[in-house]
Image (cartoon, rainbow, N blue to C red):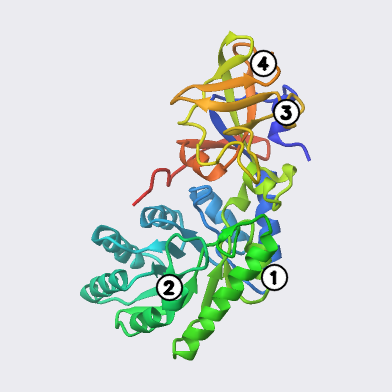
Amino acid sequence: METIFDLIRAGQWEVPETPCLMVDALVMRGNIARMQEGVAACGCALRPHIKTHKIPYFTNLQLQAGASGITCAKVSEAEVMANGGAQDIFIAYPMVGDFRVKRALELQKRIRRLILAVDSLEGAQALNEAARAQGVVCEVRLEVDTGAARTGALRQECVELGVKVSQMENLRLTGIYTFKSLVLENAPTQDAKAAAEEEVRLMDETAKALREAGLDIQDVSVGSTPTGLLAAQTGLCTEVRPGTYIFNDWMVMKEGCAEFSQIAERIYCTVVSTPRPDLAVIDGGIKTFPMDAPIGAAPYYYPGYAVILDKEGQPQENLVLRRMSEEHGIVTAENGETDLHVGQVLELIPIHVCPAVNLQNHIFLYERGELLCIPVEARGMLV
């Protein structure tokens, strides 16, 4: 399969501008199909998280492939996706703040199904009061902390909180959800299978406890790109919510849940200065490459803020991107010679693609011989 990246390396296609993020549609569609088919074969629903792409075009491809709905982090993201046609949206983030609740209730009027999240009594009470004032009932899920130590009610408090939420007249508690990813026994792990099995076991136990208390828990929603399919295969969850799988990146490849050939995106940058033999400067800095991955740290030892590829499109070890300012990426050479020249275009793979997309106003999508420029419509939607 010849990708746009192959064509660029062969000189058959030019990079339109730099820095830019480019996606190959065949690779991306293959990623969508593989996850959808794998999860569906387990009798589980797939509700992809759109935080990776933040673009309705890709949301619609996921829905057309069979996704039951989508997941968003913030209400502003959900508004963009609803404008793009999404009708079944789960906002997997505590619905706290009058401004946020107001927008969510307005959104609920426009789409077929909106699911909101609660993880505290205070948040649930405020949402219930706002819903009562509007004369509506909100479907909600209770978030459970299964080890990520982020948002989510402690498991030992879920029954008491769940019962109180279920007694609120304008909230309808239909499920529980969690995010844990590669955490096992409250610590990072490389064992995705064990992490997934622990995640669903803890959630299954929580769901059973809530049901024994008389609550009608229908949905048990779990999963990330590393654990989603593995969780679905246990048969103990009703839904998984991976996000990164649509594009994949260096991070999920190192985590063992994607092949190098399944990474659907590249970032292209131009060398703008070569002041020393061992140093070159590219036109992408921290406003192009996210800095959320620890460099050189166990267990994956990321070599820099992106992986620079050679002329054959393979990772090479000599050039590293370990220092950046706003608009400058400092490429250094391990052997003392970069062999780069001013005007040269470099091909790079981001360590973590999700925040990289959010740094772009638009991305380029190569599909059926055409290069489409697609706005990242939910970029910066943080409310």
Quarter-of-image position of residue 266: top right
Mark 4 or 1: the one toward you: 4
Name the kind of residue labelled 2 in the image.
Leu
Q: Residue at x 21, y 74 (%)?
A: 133
On screen, 310 above or below 30? Answer: above
CA gap, disc 2 and disc 3: 45 Å
- Disc 2 target residue: 142
Q: Are marks 4 and 3 in contact (CB under 8 Å)?
A: no
Helix, strand or loop under label 3: loop
Name the kind of residue labelled 4 in the image.
Thr
- Disc 1 target residue: 233
CA gap, disc 2 and disc 1: 23 Å
Name the kind of residue labelled 3 in the image.
Gln
Helix, strand or loop under label 2: strand
CA gap, disc 1 and disc 3: 36 Å
Q: How busy is the neighbourhood of tag 4: few (under 14 within 10 Å), some, or many (20 plus)?
A: some
| Marked residue nearer the N-terminal end (2 or 1) | 2
Helix, strand or loop under label 1: loop
Determine if residue 237 is in view: no
- Disc 4 target residue: 338
The spot of residue 282 in percent (x, y) is 55, 20
The spot of residue 344 in percent (x, y) is 63, 16
Q: Are marks 1 and 3 in contact (CB under 8 Å)?
A: no
CA gap, disc 4 and disc 3: 12 Å
- Disc 3 target residue: 316
| Marked residue nearer the N-terminal end (2 or 3) | 2
Q: Residue at x 66, y 44 (%)?
A: 300
Q: Is residue 374 left or right of residue 348?
A: left
Instruction: Kindly give the residue lying farthest to the left in the view shown.
Output: 133
The spot of residue 99 in percent (x, y) is 25, 58
| Marked residue nearer the N-terminal end (4 or 3) | 3
Q: Residue at x 59, y 69 (%)?
A: 199
